[in-house]
Amino acid sequence: MAFKTELTSEDLSDIRQSALGAADPLGIAADLADAAEAGRLADKDDAGYALALAAEIAESRNKLDAALRYVERSVEAYGERDDSQAGGAQALRARILFRLGRTDDALAALEPLRPLLTRHTDAPAYITAALAAGGQARVAQQWLTEAVEQALADSGNTAEPSSAEDAGVLFFLLQQRHRLRHALGLQHDTHDNLAERLETRLTNAGAATAAAAAPDLLFFRQPEFDRLLEKLPALAEPFGANWDEHRGILERELVRLTTAGRSGLTLLPATVVGLTGFAGADGDPADAKVRAGYAEQLAGREGQIPWPPERNGACWCGSGLKYKKCCLPRSR
Ligand SMILES: [Zn+2]
Ligand SMILES: [Zn+2]
């Protein structure tokens, strides 16, 4: 298999979506690494991302030595960058080191990333995932607690944040910590209480939006999702800061609706063009009413994705994985 001569950022997100279910994912990983190193990327800044993607693909097939080689090249390609993507690559490197049994190296790789916990909304998730892969959930709990306290001190606000949006990165820290502490069987503390209050408000806001005929089950496939946040970063609040979170929000909402007695639920495959088109020149795609209206429009059309799939069937999100290995666990 060979890619066309030059890969764009969009090609990379398409590859990301399809590679895990492909017949020869390791071939794809090798080709990605090649493209990055032979300068066959339309945007040279994508080299770190392409190599991290190759590493993730190799990791998913348990080719950990290959995964480590790719991810080390990825970290090198990111160089001095300390944005969220670069941090994600370093956390991935730590995760692979843990899986190789190199616990000390993994911890040493993660330690310098701790300041990112209060800077990037997705850092709490990727740092926790790396530590959890190494059986270090209690260390993650400790780091998240310290970061929450840091964020609270930094905000200097004595008043409690009134919404998840208002809390910013603190919300992602609180939410990650709350989930992790439940998984560890720990009792609620004051930070968990705050996390729960903010989460409830988020759910209520969502429920108010969905009060119309069509529930707000807009689903953006991965390349669409990436384009969405690129174009309209404010939409990370209702739809999730990354595609994993987007799918988690939807899966939890579907479970919630089912628990509330709804059946025959479907996901509404949304597009950026569709949403902005529905909003029109004067409308705001981030407006809850606009989103609900677009959902209602899609609910009357073909192409909806029935939910839930069979446990062993293909996941609704199109990842190519079995539902029980993909989005099913996201509701927990
Ligand atoms: Zn709780
Ligand atoms: Zn899925």
Image: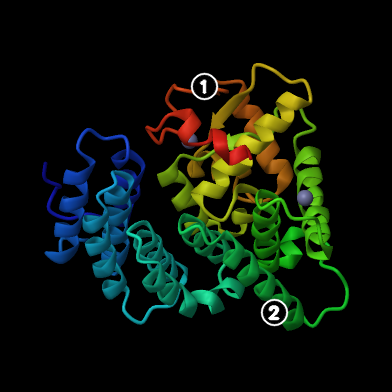
Label located before the other in sequence (1 or 2): 2
What residue lies at 35% left-to-right and 61% top-to-bottom? 101
**Horizontal arrangement in the rendering, residue 15 relative to residue 247 (left or right):** left
Residue 83, label in figure: none
Q: Nearer the viewer, residue 166 or 21?
A: 21
> What amino acid is found at the position of numbered circle 2 in the picture?
Gln
Dot 1 alpha-carbon crowd within 10 angstroms: few under 14, some 14 to 19, many 20 or more: some
**Horizontal arrangement in the rendering, residue 164 relative to residue 270 (left or right):** right
Q: Secondary structure at mark 2?
A: helix
Q: Looking at this rendering, what residue extends furthest in the right direction?
A: 159
Let me know if residue 11 appears in the view.
no
> What amino acid is found at the position of numbered circle 1 in the picture?
Pro
Question: Residue 118: image x %, image y %?
Answer: 61, 74
Residue 309, label in figure: 1
Which residue is identified by label 2?
A: 150
Q: Secondary structure at mark 1?
A: loop
